[in-house]
Amino acid sequence: MQRERAWVEVDLGALAHNVRQLRRSLSATTELMAIVKADAYGHGAEAIAQTALRAGAAWLGVATIPEGIELRQAGTAAPILVLGATNTPEQVRAIAQWNLQPTLCTPKQAWVFAETMAGLPGSAPLPVHLKLDTGMSRLGAPWQEAAAFGQLVQRLPQLKIASVYSHLATADSLDQTVMRLQQTRFQAAIAQLRAAGVDPPKLHLANSAATLSDPALHYDRVRVGLALYGLSPAPHLADQLDLRPVLQVKARVTQVKTIAAGEGVSYGHQFVADRELAIATVGIGYADGVPRNLSNKMTVLIRGQRVPQVGAITMDQVMLDVSAIAPLQAGEVVTLLGQDGTEHISADDWATTLNTISWEILCGFKHRLPRLTVNQPQDAWDEAVP
């Protein structure tokens, strides 16, 4: 780590702690699905998946088939749900080959899966998960058509219904009107399925926000993403569990210089010194995932102190006004996100400044930043909730 110009630090001990906190908030019969799509929200899918499973998660959720294959190639044996749409025979064959479990959203998709599986001699029925649209207006069959959809899939011998689920659009909102409407629709759809002779073995509806807000939304499984990584999906849910941020972003000072009053810093001279300043250049930039729109709007941590970033953030470097700190040396560590002493900067802080969401911040850190794991919880697995 000493030689890296910049890196993402992933605290696996914090992750294991978060999984245990989440599991303890669930009933003994409710499973935890760890959402590890988008390279585990930028944290590194392989290490996150292994740690989450050992700490008590039962399932993994990914967005794409290649994400699932990557986990299988890394030796992951746990069930993996592909949350995204899959529609072609090639995708069906890959799902079957790599023992993944797909989401089905339309009758046409069900027929493609059944016909393709029929051409794979000796294959057992493929577990599939029926997704219903109860108000997200994204993927899923209309909830009013749940019975017909379920009956169709149940009649296809090549497929086996493993669960029925939906996704909440506003679970992070203080106004629960839409969330309760979706819950009502989901309940109605399940009643229709059962009346039609289709009894789903598992039901799931809750994302992170719903998991934190109401046990009535937990059903048989919860799908947790952001909370797994130690961030709250909404301010009013921040105190529900003791969650610890898993990710920190750090970089090293590469040069320190003194500039005179009136000198500009970086492209366009968006910042001009009003007095003599000490300027530190740090080896990280927007090509690594530090948004350029944070230019002149962010602080970082050095030696436990906040210092301002100045000038335009460039592709590979940022500049800091370090005049208030005793002389720095090249190689000193700068914390862009994370904890240093008593000070802390979170993805939520960046998201608030940029009028976006912390999910986008976490997913934005590029792969030229190594993911370095720390605090492997070797002695803590006995704390996992079965």
Image (cartoon, helix red, strand yellow):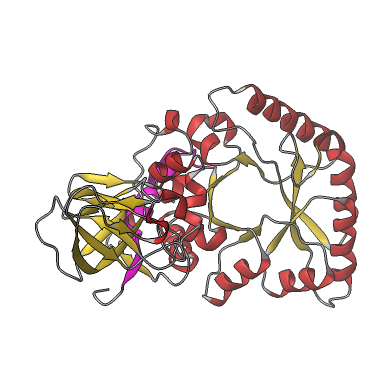
Q: Residue at x 70, y 41 (%)?
A: 166
Q: Which residues are magenta?
A: 5-29
Q: Is residue 11 one of those drawn in magenta? A: yes
* Left/right of residue 48 with respect to residue 10 in the rendered view: right
Residue found farthest to the front: 262
* Left/right of residue 124 with respect to residue 385 in the rendered view: right
Is 125 rendered above or below residue 219? below
Instruction: Determine which quarter of the picture holds residue 55.
Output: bottom left
Percent from the top left, x then y, of residue 322? 19, 55
Can you see residue 121?
A: yes
Percent from the top left, x then y, of residue 252? 26, 67
The quadrant of the image that shows the N terminus is: bottom left
Instruction: Determine which quarter of the picture holds residue 186.
Output: top right
* Left/right of residue 208 with respect to residue 258 in the rendered view: right
Nearest the eye: 310 or 234: 310
Percent from the top left, x then y, of residue 386? 44, 51
Nearest the eye: 64 or 312: 312
> For the image shown, how many numbered marks are present on the structure?
0
Nearest the eye: 315 or 152: 315
Is 170 rendered above or below residue 105? above
Can you see residue 378?
A: no
Percent from the top left, x then y, of residue 67? 60, 67
* Left/right of residue 386 with respect to residue 337 in the rendered view: right
Q: Is residue 98 one of those drawn in magenta? A: no
Residue found farthest to the left: 326
Q: Residue at x 43, y 31 (%)?
A: 235
